[in-house]
Amino acid sequence: MFSKLTSILQHAVEALAPSLPLQEDFVYHWKAITHYYIETSDDKAPVTDTNIPSHLEQMLDILVQEENERESGETGPCMEYLLHHKILETLYTLGKADCPPGMKQQVLSFYTKLLGRIRQPLLPHINVYKPVQKLIRLCGEVLTAPTENEEIQFLCIVCAKLKQDPYLVNFFLENKLKAFASKGSASVITEDMLKGQDSLVTDIGQSVQPEEISNAAGAEQVEKEDDLSTSLDELNVTSSPEASAIRLNQDYNLVNSLLNLTKSPDGRIAVKACEGLMLLVSLPEPAAAKCLTQSTCLCELLTDRLTTLYKALPLSVDPLDIESVEAINWGLDSYSHKEDASAFPGKRALISFLSWFDYCDQLIKEAQKTTAVAMARSVRERFFVGVMEPQLMQTSEIGILTSTALLHRIVRQVTSDVLLQEMVGFILGGHREPETLTDINRHPLRYRLIEHCDHISDEISIMTLRMFEHLLQKPNEHILYNLVLRNLEERNYTEYKPPCQEDKDVVENGQIAGAVDLEEDPLFTDLSPDNTLSNQEWLSASPPISPEHPKNDGKTEVHKIVNSFLCLVPEEAKSSYHVEGTGYDTYLRDAHRQFRDYCAICLQWEWPGSPKSLEKCNLEASFFEGHFLKILFDRMGRILDQPYDVNLQVTSVLSKLSLFPHPHIHEYLLDPYVNLASGCRSLFSVIVRVVGDLMVRIQRIPDFTPKLLLVRKRLLGLEPEGPIIDHMTLLEGVIVLEEFCKELAAIAFVKYHASSTP
């Protein structure tokens, strides 16, 4: 109480007294602080009961006022006094001792305000960055310490200063003597070597001047002695043949202190520490990037926490809950189970895991290239391979389903190109040569995941197909190449017939050489010309065959392709024309939007505009569509006998593949007139076989068309659920098949129109 009264009287006297020159005023306040330590006998009283906070605040105000009164960048006498008399060094010593109690908070606050409020660059001064370095080491030492808030504020202002001038980070890479074994050669470490080492470089690699050493404060001298004894301990000099040698290593204590504070139970402190790390990893300085990945535990901490949070998840989280949990943002990971109406068991743990994964993803996205690669590789090796792979490879259906749902969520969430690259390598491997049936299990995880697309459990099949569907939409060329394109590169699915004069005459008469006319195909004998689409019915947009549109690119006329798909399903198996809003034109709009998006993804991949010339292709090699397409085609071939949800997912993946603007994909998946080599199948040929089977089975089902229409209306919610209808799986499969054919027709048309538009 008495000290507070003294403080009030002092302020009153200062207000009445004539204003002193700034430097005198500054020195007065500093001496008032030092006199406290000389005169006081009670060092247990908290600092808030003394005048020290008031004097420190006055010193800051004077420094700010001095800077405002001077030319930009000019150092005033008060700042000169602070630097020359090593005031920050002294304050650090008082803060470290925390004398009087609470002094550490006052010192941290003073440093923070000084760096934040003074515009001129202070950190390059040795009498600033040295004590700042030491104060950084005190931060994060004890979790939930009373100074945590001041510590994080101080660390963040240092990070902000480094962001403004990245080169300054070199001041905070602290040199440290390390020992390493030198096999077969005895190394004698002499006192001269240590002296030479000590005087060779400072923490910023500059020569140390003798006068700087002689002017060192007592506290700094103690610190140096401690460093030297530590270095000698680390050297562990022995007389054994495998003697130790000296090497210079660097500590990045700013990172280590922030890493400690990311573990704080106080969410606000942890988020601020994460923000500080985000700033540091983005600094472009190569030395800092190297130190960050080699001399800190950043990579280990990121992945260890991912592992811990992943293992904390319940063994059987509902996949729908994993899918539906709201978008995760690492900085906003605040969740109250009591306030959440849609809470489910494990939601808190799931949000924590996804939030930390999002932080890792954003950190890698922002990081300097070297740092990003090291962090992403660590996530792959220590988390994807070490933790997730065993879960994905297990035999328990519940375990497979949960881990695949989590992998799907991660695939959807990842945005960093570097982390995506590592994740793709983890899932698919790096192989790019054509597949063969005997080597499809070369990358065991890829093989297992593709096999899961045709799992006995429909839930696992659907979840894995959804994961691949989202993977295909990621901006990474290797995904599509590894799954599909490497097997189509040589176009050995085609049977090459050199064109003869007779073929040329046929082409000129409007027919395609080697193509089978659908009206002559035994599967389509019931079709009349009236059943085909007229030009007007595909929005009058079909390019006319005329001299202005010569057929010199080898493409089948688009109206033939469109009609081929639209006429695949026989009339008695069609039901969409009975229901409004299910026409072909709705697919055209969707296909146009999606194709534009896919073109944007593939723009930088430099794909060819036309197929590889058959003369340059190795058509003698045996064709295998690849494991992925094999499973999809097998599934497609069973569309009449599979559950509705499975069929929707299979056709969704195939339609996404068809949208890619690669000429070989277009030819193989969307050209019904391609001359298939013996024993090969294409998407169109698979559907033709399904239709052949359907036409036989229709004959055995009475009232097939009315039942089909009723099922469609129920699926659309236009009819209430009623009695179970016979052959429900077949009827639903027919509806999916009809819609899929319309979707493929729309994609083919949109792609043709895009390629023919200048």
Image: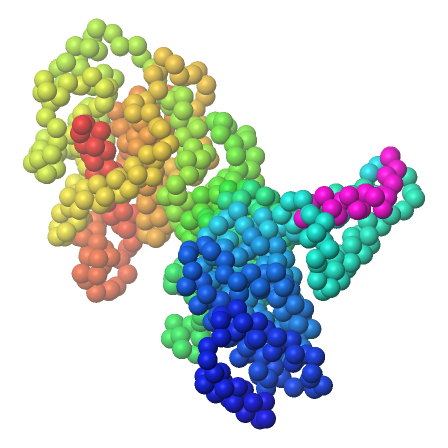
From which residue to which does the magenta span run?
184-202
Q: Is 710 above or below relative to 535?
A: below
Instruction: Give the x, y percent position of residue 80.
Output: 56, 61
Q: Quadrant of residue 619?
A: top left
Q: Residue at x 70, y 86 (%)?
A: 42
Instruction: Give the x, y percent position of residue 253.
Output: 63, 57
Q: Nearer the viewer, residue 541 or 175?
A: 175
Total number of numbered discs in the rendering: 0
Q: Residue at x 46, y 77 (%)?
A: 19
Quadrant containing the C terminus in the rendered view: top left
Quadrant containing the N terminus in the rendered view: bottom right
Q: Nearer the viewer, residue 94 or 665?
A: 94
Residue located farthest toward the right when viewing the structure as drawn: 239
Q: Nearer the viewer, residue 233 or 326?
A: 233
Does the rendering let one see residue 153? Answer: no
Q: Quadrant of residue 443?
A: top right
Q: Is 708 above or below relative to 70?
A: above
Q: Residue at x 61, y 60 (%)?
A: 84
Instruction: Give the x, y percent position of residue 489.
Output: 40, 24
Q: In the shown orientation, is residue 356 left or right of residue 291?
A: left
Image coloring type: rainbow
Residue located farthest toward the top when viewing the structure as drawn: 501
Residue located farthest toward the front when viewing the structure as drawn: 18
Q: Residue at x 34, y 35 (%)?
A: 602
Q: Quadrant of residue 574?
A: top left
Instruction: Give the x, y percent position of residue 519.
Output: 17, 27
Q: In the shown orientation, is residue 623 left or right of residue 191?
A: left
Q: Is residue 233 magenta?
A: no
Q: Nearer the viewer, residue 356 or 108?
A: 108
Q: Is 626 above or below relative to 641?
A: above
Q: In the shown orientation, is residue 602 left or right of residue 542?
A: right
Does the rendering let one see residue 413? Answer: yes
